Image (tube, grey):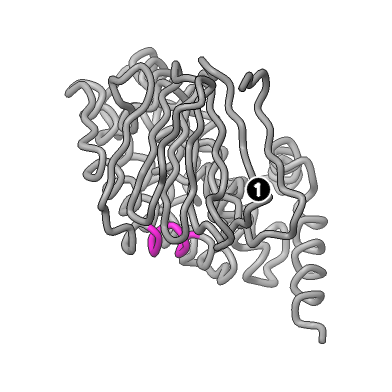
Amino acid sequence: MKISKNIVHDPRNNEKLYLSTLAINSVPFLTSKIFEGGYGKLDKYFYVTRVKNKGYQSIVFSLSGQGKIIFEDESEILLKPGSAFFSSATGRAHKEEVVGDDLWEMLWFSTYKDSPNLIIHSPDYQLVENVNFDFVKECFLDIFNEELYSDLRSLEAIELHERLFILSIERIFGITEPLRVRENRRKLQKMWVQVSNTPENSWSINELCNYINLSRSQLSRICKELYNKTPAEIVRGIKIDHAKVLLRSTTYPISVISERIGYANSNNFSTTFKSVTKTTPQNFRKEYLNSKTNILSP
């Protein structure tokens, strides 16, 4: 079997959930460099192929039913309930598929290869078996539930569920990281939580540096190392995520929302919002209200 490209083969209407931009850009997942993920109940016609040396790490948790990993040399790993498969960025090409006629319930996510706290030292893969994933599943699905709930505390709740999810993964795999990287991550995460709690502040680069007691060059270097983003990009993302929550959960005018996330000029806010989301705040709210109406309609 030769695997030459990444393929997702899903001819049926399987039950699937995918992490949104809001979840991906929340502080814990941003810090851990998780860039995609999802949950599914999949039938026997579903499969995924991943090339060798893919450049990112992929993690699969088998919750119920069975799946398997098939490598190019035809060797296989059976993923029974309680199995976790962690493929490294330099791992072999493989295929993930369902075993038997029962639905395979699984959750998965991918991280950049330089994730500071979700990385293994094996050049190929790591397999963990006989694990109770109930808490991991609960934390993961609660992220989706909070996005649907979408009130003023949802962003805070999403970050809490993400932190618990990542902590559980670290313990399952016994993952460690260099002390320097871990300390930098923890130090900055405290700052991002403060930014998230006070989005009405401007949070200029100088204000960030004063809060964390680092120079501009030090802060920029650490942000590049941990998130591959500038401090300004991270602050902007946090503010826009708060704006999304306000647009969905309140009837505040755009000018009020602008002030609540630290933009004195609503035109500047609208321009920034569009540059990040590719739509205006007004259209974002309108599309959300239309989608909510469609869901409630009989």
Q: For the N terminus, which image quadrant?
A: top right
- Give the image location of residue 42, x and y in percent: 60, 56
**Residue at x 25%, y 52% (from the top left corner):** 130
Please state which of residues 55 and 49 is positioned toward the viewer in this rendering: 49
Residue extending furthest left? 179
User: From the viewer's perspective, is residue 38 above or below residue 252?
Assistant: above
Q: Residue shown at 62%/37% (left/top)? A: 48
Taking 132 as reference, is 274 left or right? right
Which secondary structure type mostly characterizes the magenta part of the structure? helix
Of residues 44 and 15, which is closer to you in this image?
A: 44
User: Left or right of 252: which side holds 62?
Assistant: left
Q: Which quadrant of the figure contains the C terminus? A: bottom right
215 and 19: which is toward the camera: 19
Residue 229 visible here:
no
In this view, the residue farthest toward the bottom is: 298
Instruction: Give residue 178's position: percent from left, percent from top.
Output: 21, 21
Q: For mark 1, what is the residue?
A: 46
